[in-house]
Amino acid sequence: MGKPTRGGGNDRRSRWRTLRLVAVQLVIAVVVLEIALRVIAPRTGIRRLLYQPAATTFYQSLKSIEELLDRSILGFVPHTESYGYVLNAKGLRTTEYIVEKPRDVFRVLAFGDSFTWASGGLPHEQHWPTVLEKKLRGSLGGSVEVLRLGVPATGPDFQFRLWQIEGSRLDPDLVILGFFVGNDFVDHRGRKATKGLREHPMLDLLGDYSFGFRLARNLVRVTRGVAAGHGHGRENDGNTGHDLGGYPIADYSRTFRLDRPTFRREKFMEIEARRMALCLEENNASFEFLLDKVGATLMAFHQEVEDMGGRFVVMVIPDEYQVDPALAQEAAAVQGRVLEEYDLKRPSRRLGEYLNDRSVDVLDLTPEFIRVGGDLRLYRRRDTHWNRSGNRLAADLLDRYLTEDGAGGLEWERPDSISGADFETGDLGGFRGMPGPGGAAGDLTQR
C-alpha cells in the first residue's frame, strides 16, 4: 500500500484545526452566556427560568429586603402586577403597611411560599390570609391586620431571614408559617442534604453550578409540562406604571379560569412522584436529616418570635398526594412502584412530632384535608396549589385553632345537588346557604 499523499495529511490537519477552533468558540460562547446570565438574569424575568429548588442558597449575609427578594425567582419589583394584585412598596403581595403597629390592632404576619403568595394565582379575596383576616375580626371582635409576607419558590431559611429583616420590625402578635411538605423540606438544602431525593442526580448537579444549563433544562420543562391555556392569569407582567401598590385589581377575578389545569397530566404526575420520594422507607435517613435541618430553622424562628412577645404557629400544608389516594397511586406507578411502598403521612406526621416535642405550636392540616378531601376537591386541577375551598378550609381550621384552642373539627357535607360545572361557570346561586366554610359549598371540579 502506498504512503498517504502530502495533500491528504494537510486536509486532515486542516479539519482538526477547524474542529479545535469550533470547540474553543463553543467554550467561549458557553462562558460568555454563563457570565451574562449571572449578571443580567437577576434583573429580568429570566430569573424564573433559573429556578433550581435544591441548590444551596445562603441568606444570612443579606441585609435588606431588596437584597433578599433579589435572590428569589420573584425579584424586587414594587408596584408591579402579580396575579391580579399590585405589589406594595416592599415588593410583597400585601397591603401597604406602616412599621409601627397601630394601637388596638391585632397584627398577624403570614409567611410561606407560593401557598402564602397566591396559591396558584387565586384571586385575592379567595386566598387564605384574606379569609382568615375576616374570620379573626369576627372571632376576636376587634381590629385585625393580616400581612401576607409569602414569597414563591422559597423555603424556611429564606422565610426566617425575611422575618429577621422585615417581620421582626412589625411587632406582630402572631406569626404563622405555612410549611408545605411537598417541597419545603428540600428547597435550597443542597446536594448533600437531598441525596437520594433528586430526580436526576447528575443533571441536578450540573444545574447547581451552571445557570446556562438551568435555563435550557427549565425551558424544556416549561415547553413540555405546561398545559395550553392554563388558568394562572398574569403572574407578573412587568407593568410598573402604578404609582401606588398593595391592592387587588378589580377585573382579575372575572378573567381567572379556575377550571383550566396548569400542567399536562404526565408532567403533573412526574412532579407528584418526585415529591413522594420523601415517603419511601429507603429514603428515611435522608428525610430525617432534612427534618433536623428544617427543624433547627423553625426552632430559631420560634424562639425569636417568642422573645419579642409574639406567638409562633407552624401550619403544616399537605401535598395533594396525601389527600387523594387515586392520584398517589397513579404517581407511584410513574416510578414503577405500588402505593404500599410509601408512608404518605410521614412528612406531616414527623414534622408535627418534632415540633410538638419542642413545644412549638403546630396545626397539621393533613387529617382534616384527608377527611374533607374525600368529598370535596381542595386543590386546583393539576396545579399543586389549593383552590378556593382549600383556602377556605385552611382559614377555618386556623381560626378555630387560634380562637378555640383547636377544639372540634369541621363537619362538611357534600352538596350532591350542585354540579361542578355550575360552580366553575360562576352560577353560584345554588351554592348560597349550602354547608361548607363561610356558608358556601366547596369546589367540585373534576380531577
Image: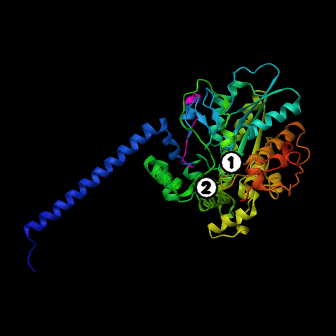
The quadrant of the rendering that contains the N terminus is bottom left
Place residue 356 in its image quadrant: top right
Q: CA separation, marks 2 and 1?
A: 32 Å
Looking at the picture, does residue 242 appear above or below residue 155? above
What is the secondary structure assignment of the residue under circle 1?
helix
**Residue 62, magenta (yes or no):** yes
The mark nearer the N terminus, 2 or 1, is 2
Q: Magenta span covers which residues?
A: 54-66
Looking at the picture, does residue 37 appear above or below residue 324? above
Q: Which residue is mark 1?
A: 292
User: Could you tell me the amino acid type at mark 2?
Assistant: Phe
Residue at image position (46%, 39%) is 41
User: Could you tell me the amino acid type at mark 1?
Assistant: Asp
Q: Is residue 362 left or right of residue 194?
A: right
Residue at image position (63%, 43%) is 155
Q: Is residue 396 left or right of residue 33?
A: right
| Residue 313 visible in image | yes
Q: Which residue is mark 2?
A: 263
The kind of secondary structure the magenta stretch mainly shows is loop
Q: List x then y, in percent, for residue 343.
A: 74, 62
